[in-house]
Image (cartoon, grey):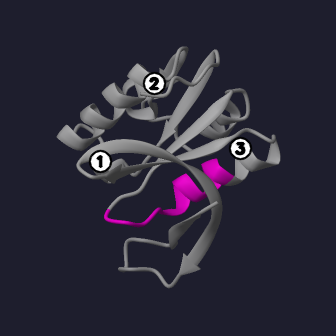
Amino acid sequence: MMKIEGRLAYFAHSMAKYNTKDEKEQLNFLRKVFLGTVICPNNNLGEMGSMKPYLDVVSKVDVLFVAEFNGFIGTGVRKEINEAKKHKIPVLVLRIEGGKYTLKEFGKVLPLKPINQNTFFSAKLHLA
């Protein structure tokens, strides 16, 4: 298993995954591969009223980990990716391959039409 060095990482993922088995398993995996502290907005930050405080945290981390929800990302995760790229912070996408979690280098966001009336933005992630 690869190990990733750094002091702080941020786990960007859909609020639909909060307090689920998936979130817990993914966070456990990230904490095994990242040698520093992984910040989970659900567990470590809570509701902060707007995206700005979350983006402020993202701007200070060493790496951004991104997990999709049903193969897509939404508005908040897109903003977190954009913030990381603005600060030249590496972005790694969490995927399952062969039944095991793996991390892939982020390429770009591929915007799509909203998948439902509650999703203002949806996209697929293209790997590098």
Q: Position of residue 113 (x, y in %)?
A: 50, 85
- In the rendered structure, the answer to whether residue 29 lies left or right of residue 104 reads left
Q: Which residue is mark 1?
A: 17
Q: Is residue 76 magenta?
A: yes
Q: Residue furthest right?
A: 87
Q: Position of residue 78 (x, y in %)?
A: 59, 58
At mark 2, the secondary structure is helix
> Three-letter amino acid code at disc 3?
Ala
Q: Name the mark nearer the viewer: 2 or 3.
A: 2
Q: Which residues are magenta?
A: 70-81
**Rendered image quadrant of residue 111:** bottom right
Q: Nearer the viewer, residue 22 or 19?
A: 22
Q: Which mark is residue 84?
A: 3
> Three-letter amino acid code at disc 2?
Val
At x 68% / y 27%, what residue is drawn?
62
Q: CA distance from mark 2 to mark 3?
A: 20 Å
Q: Which mark is residue 123?
A: none
At x 46% / y 33%, what residue is drawn?
41
Q: Which residue is mark 2?
A: 33
